[in-house]
Amino acid sequence: MPPLLQVENLRTYFHTPRGIAKAVDGVSFQVEQGKTLAIVGESGCGKSITALSLLQLVPEPAGYIEGGRILFEGRDLLDLTWDQMRRVRGDDIAMIFQEPMTSLNPTFTIGYQLVEAMTMHGKFTGAQARQRAKDLLARVGLQDPAQALRQYPHELSGGMRQRVMIAIALSNEPKLLIADEPTTALDVTVQAQILALIRDLQREQNMGVLLITHDLGIVAETSEEVAVMYAGQIVEYGPTSAIFHEPRHPYARGLFASLPARGRRGQDLATLEGIVPPPTAWPPACRFEPRCAYRWDTCAQVPPKYHPADSDRPVRCHLYDPEIADRPARGAAPIAKEPVAPDPTVEAAR
Amino acid sequence: MLRYVLRRILYAVPILVGVALLTFVLFYASASPQSLARRNLSTRNPTQEQIQQWLKDHGYDKPLSVQFKNHVTGLLVFRFGKSDATGEPIWNRIKQGAGPSGLVASLVFLTGLTAAISFAVAVAYFRGTYVDYFGTFLCVLLMSIVFIVYVIGLQYLLGKILKYGPIAGFQTGIAAWKFVLLPVVIGVLAGLGSETRLFRTFLLDEINQDYVRTARAKGVGERAVLLRHVLKNALIPIITSTVAAIPALILGSLVLENFFGIPGLGSYLIDAINSQDFAVVRAMVYLGSILYIVGLILTDIAYALVDPRVRLE
Amino acid sequence: MGRFFQSDLFYNLVPLLVTAALIFVVVRARRQPLWAEAYRRIGRNKIALTALGVICLYGFVALLDSIGSTDPKTQTRRTLLDRVFEKEKEKTYSAPGARMTTGEPIPSPLKAPGTHLLGTDGVGDDVLYRTLKGCRTAFIIGGLTSLIATPLALCLGLLAGYFGRRTDDAVQYTYTVLSSVPSILLLIALILVLGRGLLQICLALGITRWVGLCRLTRGETLKHRDRDYVRAARALGVSNARILARHILPNLLPVVIISVTLGFSGLILSEAILSYLGVGVGAEIGSWGNMIDAARDELARDPVIWWNLTSAATALFVLVLAFNIFGDALRDAVDPRLRSS
Ligand SMILES: Nc1ncnc2c1ncn2[C@@H]1O[C@H](COP(=O)(O)OP(=O)(O)O)[C@@H](O)[C@H]1O
Ligand SMILES: [Mg+2]
């Protein structure tokens, strides 16, 4: 059986005044039914654009999907017509966004927006949808569902709004839920509740979940697999436990280095030195090279392969590429600064 | 709601006093009554008595402070006095003219608003395509043509070349449509460019909001997104901007009524301008301000009706 | 001294100085980083450059019509434009390029047959010449009004926004009252009182126009007043006048310049409308509004006199269009946040 979602070499570009921005540049991953894949990375790495590309909701007209395949239950979503794709959205694949404060239409009631999501796909009649709306609101934990149906978004708190968003997303029992930083804008206590809710619902409905976050604590608790994303590419991909235990890519090491205890929630990414360069100005070879503590001459000249160092843990780094011969010898000092993680050469040799 | 409206009306009083003051300073303090009298008396060389009599009739003989008091209190209770030129009570003419003017202006307003919103939605639907570029450019073209050229040009086109019905005049009742149609078409056309362009930017502002993405992610089709989600939100700035249409409507009724011989307030004012009838102009300025302030209040109420976040407290 | 203000020298100096000042400012502004970027963006925008070219062309005609000398024989001032384009007066209307007059029961031959490229008007003046004469009026109305309204709006807006309290109340009250009189009515009233004439119209337009800009200035000043750099300056004991002039005003300039440019086309259109309503610049001054106004009767004639209306309306349309396009481009170039699309 094919995986629920299989993305192959997805590329999403933007036309900008400064040239073409390759916001997502050759991303591949897969999500199994009932399982969670987390995508982590700093702001501006292309996580949200990846997620929007799956639903073909990339901001137009600047953004466009340049190429790749998005296989959902075996069929390529990029081959669908506009209207077929519309029917996939919200029905087979649903999405929750980062900004609960602005993601609901301020001029319609909660009830209207919830019912609209259901009647849109013809699965429920108006009356059924209204009943189900009430049930859903109760299920996501709103105190007074009947009243909430009549309320407008501005009358609810951020956490409540995110619950409503979850109710909308789950209203058609989707097979895949994309959650783009669903808790970033919320208080820490509310974050835990929302995550627990998503996890419970995932179990109930056996959904696949694509969770985007830059909170590593969340990753450890919720996901089976992790993809670390940097500058539009996945730089490391593998089982959560393995990556947590031993991050390989220098970028991943930087991220995880600051995590002293597993599962520390509410913890943002470690502060790596420097920032993600804008997509129009990405370094030609290794995109992490200017910030990398382990770099050497080759890193600025040869783009690293997304090299399966071992089959279930590909890493995009010369350190793990057996074909790269000029790797500095063991003990050679890194150019920029002392490595914080285990010595790379030792690992490469293993 | 009622409380809110009352309070708004109360706030309007100082503004109206200000307007009354302004008109007083403009007209009373800057033109000498003597010259007014001379200009408005029909005889070539009026005697001093005639002038005195005229001043007395029109209340220009009292001391300035008394005149001021009379002026302000008169305006506040809609006592406009007599026309300088004809001696006719101004209020009578206003009552007669309000009907035709109101008919034309409200038709222009409603049709224009509907047309502009429809075009804006259409242009926004095709955003980023050549339809959009062409439409926007067309709007700029329309904006760059003077009102009067529309009037003269269309009247020529329809009347002379297409031999379309009566060109000037007015009738009350249902028969009015024949006389009103052309002025309304021209009035709508004249404002279409700038309104469509403005509304388009409102719509495009909304299209980039997060909730639109949510609606699309729910599977709502593009047309429903635009007509339901985006339009309802864009109506908020659209409504706020419609007060700005009032001055344009007034200008429209001035030009159109005069041109098409519709016996409304606009024609009255033009006649007053031509005969330098200060009393009438004064009254119209004041009336225009009241209209504008009422428009503002109505806008606020409409605003509260569309936007659930606003409550009239 | 009084002689000087009436002399040809003075009349020629003013437009030349204004032009020179404008060119100086435009060239100097390029050194500022913000404007340098804007220049670059406009430089890439072909349509905006074309519009700018059209505006400059009109401006050049207006300048030609502002420089001249007094003819010793007739004791009337003749501008360069007059010298080049003025033609002998015909009897009455004649079609473009015609050899005979139009509109008379029996057409009579023209004095200068075939030379009136755009025909002649009712009193026999060359329409091309009249149309070109309108440029100067348009630029004076746009420019002088902006010169009246902008400083007034800036001063009051800055004061109201910066000092708040009473000053703010007074300024706000003033412009609320002024803005609650629909502008066309206020204009009519002002012109009736002030009398007709170019200067009076500019003054009246200025009085109705400053309100919008003042509101804008006040709002922007309020925003800047509480910024850190202003607080820091105040804490350092910098005088209010200096803070306003050195710190706040420069930040407002882009917004003000955009708004003035965008307002220019509206001002030029106003002239035509006012002329039509009978409160225009007056018949002795050549203006497009007067020409369009005359066309009301001309289109009803048989044969139709269309050239007068067409020439004036086209001249007006092209200039207003150019200002609209250039204003939009300027706004987009200076402040991408205000972008219209
Ligand atoms: N509408 C847009 N136009 C141009 N570039 C964009 C647009 N939206 C996003 N990008 C670019 O795509 C990159 C990835 O953005 P995003 O996916 O939102 O990052 P994140 O990982 O923080 O979610 C960003 O660097 C941004 O510059
Ligand atoms: Mg994001």
Image (cartoon, rainbow, N blue to C red):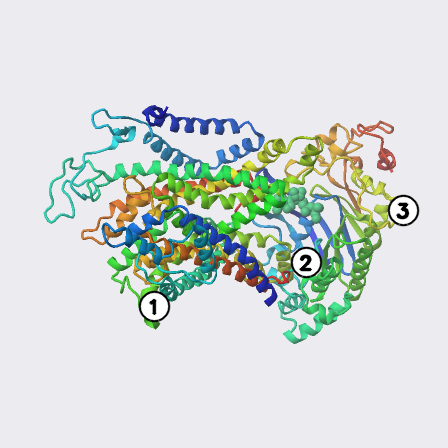
Type of the residue with mark 3? Ala
Q: Could you tell me which chain the residue with mark 1 belongs to?
A: B
Residue beneath label 1, please? Answer: B177
Q: Position of residue C239 (x, y in %)?
A: 65, 31
The disc label shown at residue C310, or none: none
Residue B260 placement: quadrant: bottom left
**Real-space Cα distance between discs 2 and 1?**
61 Å
Q: Are marks 3 and 2 on the same chain?
A: yes
Mark 3 or mark 2, which is nearer to you? 3
Residue beneath label 2, please? Answer: A72
* Above or below for C188 versus C88: below
Residue at (80% x, 32% y) in the render: A294
- Residue A125 seen: no
Q: Is mark 2 within 8 Å of ligand 1?
A: no
* Above or below for A278 versus B194: above
Type of the residue with mark 1? Trp
**Within-10-Å neighbours for mark 2: few <14, some 14–19, many 20+:** many
Residue B166 placement: quadrant: bottom left
* Left or right side of C97 for C243: right
Q: Is mark 1 within 8 Å of ligand 1?
A: no
Residue beneath label 3, please? Answer: A261
Type of the residue with mark 2? Phe
Q: Nearer the viewer, residue B143 or C195?
A: C195
Mark 2 or mark 1, which is nearer to you? 1
